[in-house]
Structure formats: C-alpha cells, structure tokens
Image (spheres, helix red, strand yellow):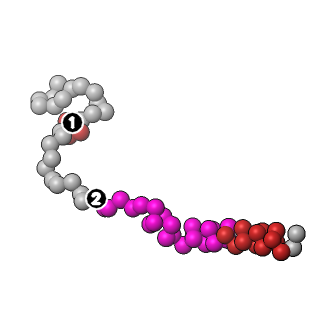
C-alpha cells in the first residue's frame, strides 16, 4: 500500500475530512424579504394586470348589471 495514504473508501479523500477553518467564511448577504420580491418588475406587471382585470370586473358588476 502507499505510504501515508488513506486506504479506506475511494470516494472520501483526507482533504474532504479536514474540517479545520483555514480561511474566514465568505460574508453572507442580508436576507431579502417580501418587499424585495414585490419590487421585481415581472411580478409587478403580473400583479398590475390582475388588479386591472379585477377592477374591470367590479366596475362591470357595479354599473352594467
């Protein structure tokens, strides 16, 4: 067998088992909440179309029926 080599499972090498922290972890971004999701243009266009359809239906029900 090879000197100084791990002869266990071939899928897990010694580098994978090393859990020491040599570097600081990358800084995480702030979590983005609901207001960030609502500010996306495709979602705003979709919500505007749905709102206009609901408004048209309510105006139709109120004034034409």
Magenta segment: does it hold 40? yes
Badge 2 element: loop
Left or right: 15 in relation to 10: left
Q: Earlier in the sequence, mark 1 or mark 2?
A: 1
State whether the magenta stretch is mostly helix, strand or loop.
helix
Indicate the position of residue 50 as horizontal and vertical percent values: 68, 67
**In the picture provided, is 53 more to the left or to the right than 60?**
left
**x and y, in percent, of residue 58 in the image:** 76, 69
State yes or no: residue 48 in magenta. Answer: yes
**Quadrant of residue 47 within the rendered picture:** bottom right
Image quadrant in which you'd find residue 16:
top left
Closer to us: 55 or 16: 55
Mark 1 vs mark 2, CA separation in Å: 24 Å
Q: Is residue 53 visible?
A: no
Image point (72%, 67%), residue name: 54
Indicate the quadrant containing the N terminus: top left, top right, bottom left or bottom right.
top left
Residue that badge 2 annotates: 28
From the viewer's perspective, is residue 21 above or below residue 10?
A: below
* Quarter of the image with the C terminus in it: bottom right
Residue 13 vs 31, above or below: the answer is above
**What is the crowding at mark 1: few (fewer than 14 residues within 10 Å), some, or many (at least 20)?**
few
Residue in the picture at 16% in, 31% down: 5
- The answer to whether residue 17 is visible is yes
From the viewer's perspective, is residue 53 above or below residue 16? below
Query: Residue beneath label 1, please?
Result: 17
- Placement of 30 over or under 7, stated as above or below: below
Give the mark toward the camera: 1 or 2.
Answer: 2
Locate residue 57 relative to residue 20 in the image: left or right: right
Q: Quadrant of residue 63?
A: bottom right
Q: Which region is colored magenta?
A: 28-50
């Amino acid at each position: 067998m090879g000197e100084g080599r791990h002869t266990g499972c071939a899928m897990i090498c010694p580098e994978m088992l090393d859990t020491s922290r040599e570097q600081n972890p990358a800084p995480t971004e702030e979590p983005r909440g609901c207001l960030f999701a609502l500010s996306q243009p495709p979602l705003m266009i979709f919500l505007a179309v749905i709102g206009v359809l609901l408004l048209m239906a309510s105006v139709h029900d109120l004034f034409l029926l």
